Image: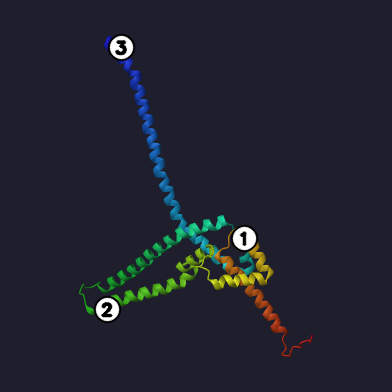
């Protein structure tokens, strides 16, 4: 009986320890699950950054096909938060695009080279000089054709287009904007009211970006072109009369 009583006294404490241990294990499991779940989410977000960046490039390509007035209105409405977010996205997507392009182009070239090699050594496995020349010539030709295709593709979604999209959203810096470009934009701002109005509307909401300098110069250039064309139409070759004071 005394032994039975001692066992009965120990059971509540043992049950309590078991319940506490189970709660500890459950808490640890939830922590591990949450910790492993966060990197998975981040990795998924990084993977979709490439597709989001490509979508942003397609939007820029469509924007450049619109009239210039609509392009100016689009950039005028941009905020610092939007441009900084797009810059961060393009920074990640650009790196992924370079890696994917290198792997993709190399894989295609190696597959084509493998097909040519298989056709040459389909009947026998003798290594001859002519076959080696054919292999190296084919390899050089494949690389040249792929480089040419990539160069044509570069203007719409290639590395050059990534850099242009990134630099257009970057803040004005001496590396991206030369002294001549900034001086030209300043001269257009002083000369034409619409350029000054664009600059005031932009700077009231955010800092000037590289594309703003381009827009101000282009707005002034178009205005100057209109003035020169009007003067050309009015010019008939007759000498101007200068009134004496």
Callout 1: 10 Å neighbours few (<14), some, many (20+)? few
Callout 3: 10 Å neighbours few (<14), some, many (20+)? few
Residue in view at x 73 percent, y 84 percent: 234
Q: Can you tell which mark lies on residue 203?
A: 1
Left or right: 231, with 91 as reference point: right
Q: Is residue 92 above or below residue 141?
A: above
Q: Is residue 52 visible?
A: no
In the image as oriented, which residue stretches furthest toward the front?
245
Indicate the secondary structure of the residue bearing disc 1.
Answer: helix
Residue 151 in percent (x, y) is at 44, 73
Q: Nearer the viewer, residue 169 or 161?
A: 169
Circle nearer the N terminus (2, 1):
2
Callout 2: 10 Å neighbours few (<14), some, many (20+)? few
Dividing the image into 4 quarters, which one contains the C terminus?
Answer: bottom right
Q: Which residue, given by chain and number where applicable, does mark 3 sit on?
A: 5
Q: Can you tell which mark lies on residue 133?
A: 2
In the image as oriented, which residue stretches furthest toward the bottom?
238
């Amino acid at each position: 009986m005394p032994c039975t009583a001692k066992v009965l006294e120990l059971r509540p404490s043992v049950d309590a320890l078991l319940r506490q241990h189970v709660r500890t294990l459950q808490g640890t499991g939830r922590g591990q699950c949450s910790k492993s779940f966060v990197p998975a989410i981040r990795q998924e977000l990084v993977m979709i950054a490439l597709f989001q960046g490509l979508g942003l490039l397609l939007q820029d390509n469509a924007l450049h096909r619109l009239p210039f007035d609509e392009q100016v209105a689009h950039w005028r409405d941009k905020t610092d938060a939007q441009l900084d977010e797009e810059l961060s996205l393009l920074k990640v997507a650009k790196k992924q695009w370079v890696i994917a392009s290198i792997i993709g182009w190399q894989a295609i070239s190696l597959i084509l080279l493998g097909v040519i090699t298989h056709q040459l050594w389909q009947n026998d496995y003798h290594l001859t000089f002519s076959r080696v020349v054919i292999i190296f010539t084919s390899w050089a030709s494949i690389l040249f054709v792929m480089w040419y295709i990539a160069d044509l593709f570069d203007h719409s979604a290639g590395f050059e287009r990534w850099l242009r999209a990134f630099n257009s959203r970057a803040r004005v810096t001496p590396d991206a904007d030369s002294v001549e470009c900034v001086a030209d934009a300043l001269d257009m701002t002083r000369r034409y009211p619409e350029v000054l109005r664009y600059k005031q509307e932009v700077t009231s909401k955010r800092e000037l970006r590289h594309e703003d300098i381009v827009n101000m110069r282009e707005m002034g250039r178009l205005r100057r072109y209109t003035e020169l064309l009007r003067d050309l139409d009015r010019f008939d070759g007759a000498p101007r009369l200068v009134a004496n004071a």
